[in-house]
Structures are given as C-alpha cells and as structure tokens.
C-alpha cells in the first residue's frame, strides 16, 4: 500500500524540519518545499495527500497558491501560519481549506486535521477512479448502443427508440441488453444515474438524420460528484 504524502510548504527551515519529524512519527510520508514555485513544479501525486501551507511565502502568497489548486479536491489544504487575520481565515475557508491553524499549534490538533484531510483525499481519489471507469465503459459502447442509451434514459420505450433510430423493436432490445451489460447497469434508475454523471443530454441531438449522445467534458462530469 502506498504511503499517503503530506506536502509541507513553508519558508521557515526549522519549522519545516519540525513538521517533517512529526509527520514521519505519525506514519505519513512528508515532502518539504521552501517556496510555492518549488512545490507547484512537482508532478501531481496519485496517492492520498494533503498540503500544509503557509500564508506568507516569499514568492507566492499562500492564498494565491490555494486559488491555483482550486481543481485539486484530492489534495485538501491545511493552512498553518503565524500571521493571520479574520479576513484571511474567512477567505481561505470559503475557498475550501480543510483547516486554518495558527503557529504554534498543538501537535494533536494538527495530526487530527491531517487525518481528516487524508480521509477526504482518499474519498476524492476513489470517486475519480470510479468516474474514469464509468467513462471507459461508456466509450466501449458501440455508436448504436450509445444512441440507444441516450434515448432510453430520456424515457423512450423500446418501440419509440426503434422508430426514432429506424430499427426494429427486437434490434433495440438486443442493443439495450448489450448496453446494460457493458455499463454494468442493474436497472433503469441505475443507468439514469450513470448518464447524469457522464453529463449525457436528456434529449439527444439529431445530426444528419442520426442521434448522437452529447457528453459533457470530464471536468464538467467531475463537478457533479
């Protein structure tokens, strides 16, 4: 099992060293950075992780770093700073910070915050993996199966689907059965939920006399999770 990573971004070398030792003693893997740019240049970690972030960094303000990482819900941010005011705290929390702590903070409080952040990260990575698997199953459908899926989740009966696609009801049933198996859908409500997560249009678009599923971008689908 991969060890969760705690990223530490703070320009105070002694405080970085203290946090590194504390995190190692708790069983997590620390990675330390003296500047925001150094951290932002690191490739994304595909394991549970969180970020301990100072506000007053020498190159990029911690709140601006948070803004740059707004789409990284798999890496919760815990602010730890010696200089904070109410406005900073409110801005950070409204932007989705997992916690906002002031130096010096108690070890048990920090470790508890990291533990909660790791739970959030693990859940986010699990949701992302499920979405990737769902997109892969949809991509594996034939074009006709995708057309049938969109019409079925829009509420069409098999006979209506056949009429709109110009195929027999028996053929619709065959495509529908294959589509349900490929999507691992146990029921129509299950399939409707999948279509919503994929961002499929409730009403298919007709192009050149044929129906096509209209899927949202991966980012848009993620926002529905």
Image (spheres, rainbow, N blue to C red):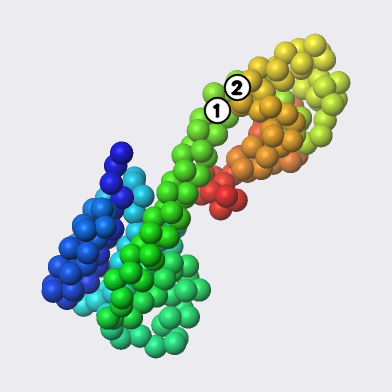
**Circles 2, 1 touching at the beta carbon (< 8 Å):** yes
Residue 104 position, x and y percent, is 27, 81
The vertical placement of 11 against 158, above or below, is below
Q: Nearer the viewer, residue 147 or 122?
A: 122
Q: Which mark is residue 137?
A: 1
Tag 1, which secondary structure?
A: helix
Q: Quadrant of residue 106?
A: bottom left
Residue occupying image coordinates x 31% and y 50% = 4
How many numbered marks have been drawn onto this rendered protein structure? 2
Residue drawn at (47%, 50%) of the image: 124
Question: Which residue is found at the position 42% from the left and 60% from the top?
Answer: 116
Name above or below for residue 159 compared with residue 18: above
Residue 52 visible somewhere in the drawing: yes
Q: Give the percent coordinates (x, y) of residue 2.
A: 29, 42
212 left or right, relative to 113: right
| 215 to 21, vertically: above or below | above
Which class describes the residues within 10 Å of circle 1: few (<14), some (14-19), or many (20+)? Answer: some
The quarter of the displayed image where residue 210 is located: top right
From where the camera sits, is residue 67 visible? Answer: no
Residue 182 circle label: 2
Q: Position of residue 166 (x, y in %)?
A: 79, 18
Q: Would residue 215 be found to the left or right of residue 84 on screen?
A: right
How would you rate the neighbour count of disc 2 (Cα within 10 Å): few for under 14, some for 14-19, many for 20 or more?
Answer: some
Residue 71 in which image quadrant = bottom left
Please determine whether, in this image, residue 72 is positioned above or below residue 99. Answer: above
- Seen as rendered, the residue at the extreme bottom is 85
Q: Secondary structure at mark 2?
A: helix
Front residue of 38 and 27: 27
Q: Position of residue 15 (x, y in %)?
A: 18, 73
Distance between mark 2 and mark 1 Cα atoms: 6 Å
Q: Quadrant of the N terminus?
A: top left
Instruction: Indicate left or right for 111 with 225 as reference.
Output: left
């Amino acid at each position: 099992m991969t060890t969760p990573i705690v990223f530490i971004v703070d320009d105070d070398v002694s405080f970085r060293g203290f946090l590194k030792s504390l995190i190692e003693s708790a069983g997590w893997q620390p990675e330390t950075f003296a500047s925001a740019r150094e951290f932002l240049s690191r490739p994304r970690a595909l394991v549970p992780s969180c970020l301990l972030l100072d506000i007053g960094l020498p190159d990029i303000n911690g709140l601006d770093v948070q803004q740059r990482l707004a789409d990284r819900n798999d890496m919760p941010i815990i602010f730890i700073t010696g200089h904070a005011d109410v406005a900073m705290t409110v801005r950070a929390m409204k932007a989705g910070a997992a916690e906002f702590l002031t130096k010096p903070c108690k070890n048990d409080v920090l470790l508890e915050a990291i533990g909660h952040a790791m739970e959030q990260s693990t859940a986010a990575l699990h949701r992302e993996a499920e979405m990737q698997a769902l997109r892969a199953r949809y991509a594996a459908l034939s074009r006709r199966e995708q057309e049938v899926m969109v019409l079925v989740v829009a509420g069409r009966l098999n006979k209506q689907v056949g009429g709109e696609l110009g195929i027999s009801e028996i053929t619709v049933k065959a495509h529908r059965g294959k589509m349900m198996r490929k999507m691992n859908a146990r029921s129509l409500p299950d399939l409707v939920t999948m279509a919503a997560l994929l961002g499929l249009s409730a009403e298919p678009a007709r192009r050149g006399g044929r129906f096509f599923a209209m899927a949202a971008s991966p980012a848009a689908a993620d926002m529905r999770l």
